[in-house]
Amino acid sequence: MSNIYQHLPFHLPDECVDVLQSESGVRIERIVSQGHSTPANQWYEQIENEWVLVLQGSGVIEYENGEQITLNAGDYLYLPAHLKHRVASTVEDKHTIWLAVFWN
């Protein structure tokens, strides 16, 4: 047994991505951010579908058309494959913990 809130990194120069489970075309990740964002003009355009849940903290997802969605603890979002998006910001004063599920 493991706990998603344990073994959090103390110092985060970069986002921390831990693969919790991966099999049969499905991958589950814990992503820990603190003041991180995707570099300006860089977009994720994944070949996988993604469902993401914020467990702690908050972050802003931005779409290529400029629309932004703020996710707080308990909020989740579905990002279909090939949808251009980026993390515009995450809070700086505490960890933002994301649970992300990817599948084909």
Image: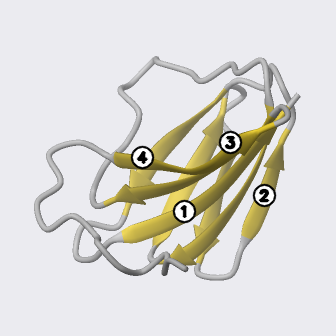
> Residue 22 shows which numbered tag?
3
What is the secondary structure assignment of the residue under circle 1?
Answer: strand
**Residue 21 higher or lower than 53, as above or below:** above
Task: Report which residue position mark 4 lands on.
Answer: 17
Badge 1 vs badge 3, beta-carbon distance below 8 Å: no
Which tag, 2 or 4, sits closer to the chain's start? 4
Task: Report which residue position mark 1 lands on.
Answer: 98
Q: Nearer the viewer, residue 94 or 64?
A: 94
Which tag, 1 or 3, sits closer to the chain's start? 3
Q: Work out how far the residue at label 2 is from the one at label 3, CA to CA, in angstroms.
A: 20 Å
> Badge 1 local density, few (<14 within 10 Å), some, or many (20+)?
many
> Residue 77 shows which numbered tag?
2
Q: Residue at x 35, y 57 (%)?
A: 33
Q: Amino acid at mark 3?
A: Ser
Q: Residue at x 54, y 62 (%)?
A: 98
Q: Quadrant of the C terminus?
A: top right
